[in-house]
Image (cartoon, rainbow, N blue to C red):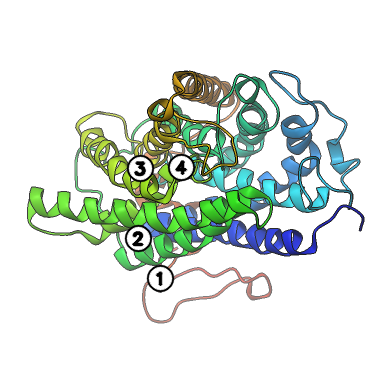
Amino acid sequence: MPGIDTGDTAWMLVATALVLLMTPALGLFYAGLVREKNTLNTFMMCLAAIGVAMVTWAVVGYSLAFDGTAKFLGGLDHAFMRGITFEPHPGTKIPEIVFFAFQATFCIITVALVAGAVVERMRFVPFLLFSAVWSVLVYAVLAHWAFGGGWLMQQGTLDFAGGVAVEMGSGFSALAAALVVRARKDYGRQALVPHNAMYVLVGAGLLWFGWFGFNGGSGFGIGKPGVLAFVNTLLAPAATLVVWILIDLVRGRQATAIGAATAVVVGCVAITPAGGYVSPGWALAVGAVAAFPCYFAILWRPRTRVDETLDVLSAHGVAGLTGTLAIGFVAQQSWNDGAGNGLLYGDAGQLWSQVVAVLAGPAYAFGVTFLLLKGLGLVMALRGPESEEALGMDLTHHGEEAYASGEGAILIGVGSGVGRSPRV
């Protein structure tokens, strides 16, 4: 194939698979954080995101994100995958169809991330409808703004692997979703603790593994930017993990497993926008610094009435904002093939470009998500009755349980794999 580098293409195929793995990994991470009766439903929200977001991306999302260089929204020339062939994607040496697939996995996991704000009470079908529309109206638009040729990119914002569309987009959308869907019935009345810390730890480990494709693949080849981002994805989360454990020990004399898993995610998120623009030394610093605002944001949130269940705002929104701003301070042209210098290396304008991004991206994500869910709530119930929530979303929405609930379980619908316990 003329203009195609086979080495770059091979790496991008691997990176695409790694990023896709992150969504089931997120499902495992999230499932461990909820109560036992909502384990399957939580995982199913993440799994369903793969199907819903992939279809919307193929139909219209990719085109709106990457067709043309209009300021606010792409065109429709690539709708229904028209023109997506083996020809090189502009500015890369990989086929357009590979670029399409890689970017699809970003849309998928971002949709799944937002689920963390509404698990344990939002009905499954309304969530699917919300996911489909959100992937187009919020994710595709922010992707166009930040790295699809839109106005943020045009005014100089640097975002290597999705700080605006993925991290801040999901985090601030999660806040809006939590406000509209409202708190769980037991929120503030009883302890709502994670039911399986091992799921959380394994999920975090798989997320970190997948993140090497997420960030390393965002160089679209095996050149210096991708290699730098790959190494920085090793360094930053390690620094966050160390600082998080130290804060835990100072505060409570115990290093919690849930905290350690969260730290890994926070470090990966913080380096996502900055991975290909900062030196390895600064990657360590970004990871270490990101631990503080995210840690204390997680501590603060339960003191409010905002039941943003799995702290997507703190772990993704705040961490993504931190990493995006860090570019404005410590980006170095000597490490990023001339993409830009931060304030500490002589360019105050780069910091301003990053500030614009951390103001515009969250505002758009929050506002559109809030209005979208309010509108959806006018035509269907976003939540079921309290009795449904009390029984658990697994049984009421899927007719299954994550764990056997007693001897003599009765299986029905064997051909379709549907199982019910004697309690149903």
Q: Nearer the viewer, mark 4 or mark 3?
A: 4
Q: Which mark is residue 278?
A: 4
Is 404 located above or below residue 54 in the figure? below
In the image, residue 393 lies at what x, y percent?
44, 51
- Badge 3 marks a residue whose secondary structure is helix
- Badge 2 marks a residue whose secondary structure is helix
- Badge 1 marks a residue whose secondary structure is loop
Marked residue nearer the N-terminal end (2 or 1): 2
Q: Which mark is residue 64?
A: none
The residue that label 1 is drawn on is: 403
Q: Which mark is residue 36?
A: 2
Q: Residues within 10 Å of mark 4 (few under 14, many from 20)?
A: many
Q: Residues within 10 Å of mark 1 (few under 14, many from 20)?
A: few
In the displayed structure image, the side of residue 276 where residue 285 appears, left or right: left
Front residue of 259/237: it is 237
Kindly report the distance in space between the C-alpha atoms of the residues bearing marks 1 and 3. 40 Å
Kindly report the distance in space between the C-alpha atoms of the residues bearing marks 4 and 3. 9 Å
Kindly report the distance in space between the C-alpha atoms of the residues bearing marks 1 and 4. 45 Å
In the displayed structure image, the side of residue 290 where residue 153 appears, left or right: right
Amino acid found under the numbered disc labelled 1? Tyr
Marked residue nearer the N-terminal end (2 or 3): 2
Residue occupying the point 28% across, 55% down = 241
Kindly report the distance in space between the C-alpha atoms of the residues bearing marks 2 and 3. 35 Å
Marked residue nearer the N-terminal end (4 or 2): 2
Q: Say which quarter of the image contains residue 89.
A: top right
Q: Nearer the viewer, mark 1 or mark 3?
A: 3
